[in-house]
Amino acid sequence: MSKSVTLAARVDADLEAELSRIATATGRSKSWLVNEALRSFVANEQQFLAAVEEGKQALREGRMVDHATVVAAFERLVAPNL
């Protein structure tokens, strides 16, 4: 396990109240909940940034699909379900 550090942040009072409620309900500390929330946020942001970079690379390489083709494909997928 890596070394822990203290991180200070300001949050809205209502958010802190909800965090306290969840901590009590789950038997977890607010610190644990915040750590897990940040871990999830960071993982999602890293995944998003990687996808953006992949898209930029595809654009540089000329691997792209025009808007009309995407819309037509979407409509073919959605139309049978309407």
Image: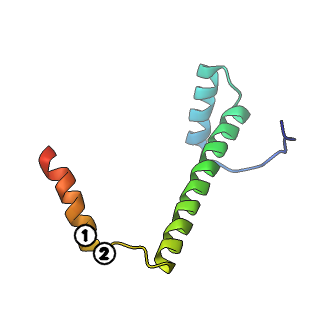
Question: Mark 1 highlights which residue?
Answer: 69
Q: With respect to residue 45, does 65 lie above or below? A: below
Dot 1: within a 10 Å radius of its alpha carbon, few (fewer than 14), some, or many (20 or more) residues? few
Name the secondary structure under disc 1. helix
Q: Is residue 82 visible?
A: no
Question: Mark 2 highlights which residue?
Answer: 66
The quarter of the picture where the N terminus appears is top right
Classify residue 25 as left or right of residue 4: left
The residue that appears at 44% across and 79% down in the rendered structure is 62
Q: Quadrant of residue 68?
A: bottom left
Name the secondary structure under disc 2. loop
Could you tell me the amino acid type at mark 1? Answer: Thr
71 or 4: nearer the viewer: 71
| Number of callouts | 2
Query: Given contact means CB atoms under 8 Å apart, are the residues at marks 2 and 1 in contact?
Result: yes
Q: Is residue 27 visible?
A: yes
Q: Residue 9: horizontal and vertical position, in percent? A: 72, 50
Q: With respect to residue 19, does 40 lie above or below? A: below
Q: Residue 71: horizontal and vertical position, in percent? A: 23, 65
Could you tell me the amino acid type at mark 2? Answer: Asp
Q: With respect to residue 58, does 31 lie above or below? A: above
56 or 7: nearer the viewer: 56
The residue that appears at 64% across and 26% down in the rendered structure is 23
